[in-house]
Image: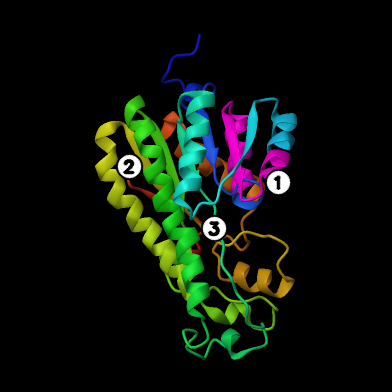
């Protein structure tokens, strides 16, 4: 019989209820997959309930553990209230929240001066696109933490993992985007991710006495069908010489942050970037 401090037990998520926002693709999907493979009951969210349920059905078939899809607009307070009400009725608890959902709007053409690293990219960033980023990536994280914390306080235990980015730690070399057809990292994205890191620290020390551990993850560049020119340039600037692989390089970090193995970690920003920020 395994003890609770056996390394296998420290990563065991059986009996845990985990909510992953924006869980139908990318990091959200990988987070859900990691938690489900470790035994958790995983709830994946999307604005589109059918997409969320389709992803949940796929994950359940893949891992054999219960999964559910749930509609959630992370920037809407009432949507969070509805989601938490559904979870409380169905499961009577919530052990893990991964605040992953994000998004930005970029309507400029990649051929515009917006993609010229010599320009001040504040000039062409529309206010409504800036506001959209803040609503989803920052206000959404705030609303998620606020919605989950009463449930976790009552339990005396919980894990909240906010997804930030290395763009919240350092500036980005926009020359990486030249001749790639990709739009560059935008100022609101960097502002939001930097804010998420410090917001995490701020609420972590407030919620820790209730047994709630709040931390964040800051991924670097991960390979997701970008043009080869971008992959090559980014890899050159990374000590490991490559971009990350969603299927393995993020899953372990997510599981660690959500599992009992990290119970003594509070207010930490775990960077997964192949050394990109270590130069």
Residue at point 63%, 74% (across, down): 233
Residue at point 64%, 45% (across, down): 29
Pick whichever, 271 or 111, lies toward us.
Answer: 111
Residue that sits furthest to the top in the current view = 1
Q: Is residue 159 above or below residue 174?
A: above
Viewer-nearest of discs 2 and 3:
3
Q: Is residue 279 above or below residue 21?
A: below
Counting from the top left corner in percent of width and height, residue 235 is at 62, 67
Mark 3 or mark 1: whose residue is earlier in sequence: 1
Q: Residues within 10 Å of mark 1 (few under 14, many from 20)?
A: some
Task: Report whether 142 appears left or right of 103.
Answer: left
Mark 1 or mark 2: whose residue is earlier in sequence: 1
Counting from the top left corner in percent of width and height, residue 217 is at 46, 51
Pick whichever, 129 or 183, lies toward us.
Answer: 129
Residue 32 part of the magenta-drawn span: yes
Q: Residues within 10 Å of mark 3 (few under 14, many from 20)?
A: many
Give the residue pinned by disc 1.
Answer: 51
Q: Which stretch did the figure color magenta? A: 28-55
Viewer-nearest of discs 3 and 1:
1
Mark 2 or mark 3: whose residue is earlier in sequence: 3
Residue at point 48%, 33% (across, down): 85
Q: Are marks 2 and 3 in contact (CB under 8 Å)?
A: no
Q: Is residue 231 visible?
A: yes
Give the residue pinned by disc 2.
Answer: 266
């Amino acid at each position: 019989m395994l003890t609770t401090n056996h390394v296998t037990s420290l990563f065991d998520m059986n009996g845990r209820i985990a909510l992953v926002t924006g869980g139908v693709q990318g990091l959200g999907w990988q987070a859900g997959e990691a938690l489900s493979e470790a035994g958790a009951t995983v709830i994946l969210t999307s604005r589109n309930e059918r997409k969320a349920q389709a992803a949940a059905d796929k994950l359940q078939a893949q891992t054999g553990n219960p999964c559910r899809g749930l509609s959630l607009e992370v920037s809407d307070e009432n949507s969070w209230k509805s989601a938490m009400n559904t979870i409380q009725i169905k499961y009577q608890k919530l052990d893990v929240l991964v605040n992953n959902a994000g998004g930005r709007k970029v309507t400029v053409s990649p051929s515009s001066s917006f993609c010229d690293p010599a320009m001040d990219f504040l000039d062409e960033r529309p206010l409504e696109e800036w506001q959209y980023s803040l609503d989803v990536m920052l206000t959404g994280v705030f609303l998620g933490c606020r919605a989950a914390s009463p449930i976790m306080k009552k339990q005396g235990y919980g894990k909240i993992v906010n997804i930030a980015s290395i763009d919240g730690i350092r500036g980005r070399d926009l020359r990486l985007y030249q001749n790639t057809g990709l739009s560059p990292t935008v100022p609101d994205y960097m502002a939001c991710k930097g804010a998420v890191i410090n917001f995490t620290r701020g609420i972590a020390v407030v919620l820790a006495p209730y047994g709630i551990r709040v931390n964040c993850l800051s991924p670097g560049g991960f390979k997701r069908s970008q043009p080869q020119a971008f992959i090559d340039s980014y890899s050159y600037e990374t000590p490991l010489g490559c971009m990350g692989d969603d299927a393995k390089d993020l899953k372990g970090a997510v599981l660690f942050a959500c599992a009992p193995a990290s119970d003594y970690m509070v207010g930490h920003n775990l960077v997964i970037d192949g050394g990109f920020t270590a130069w």
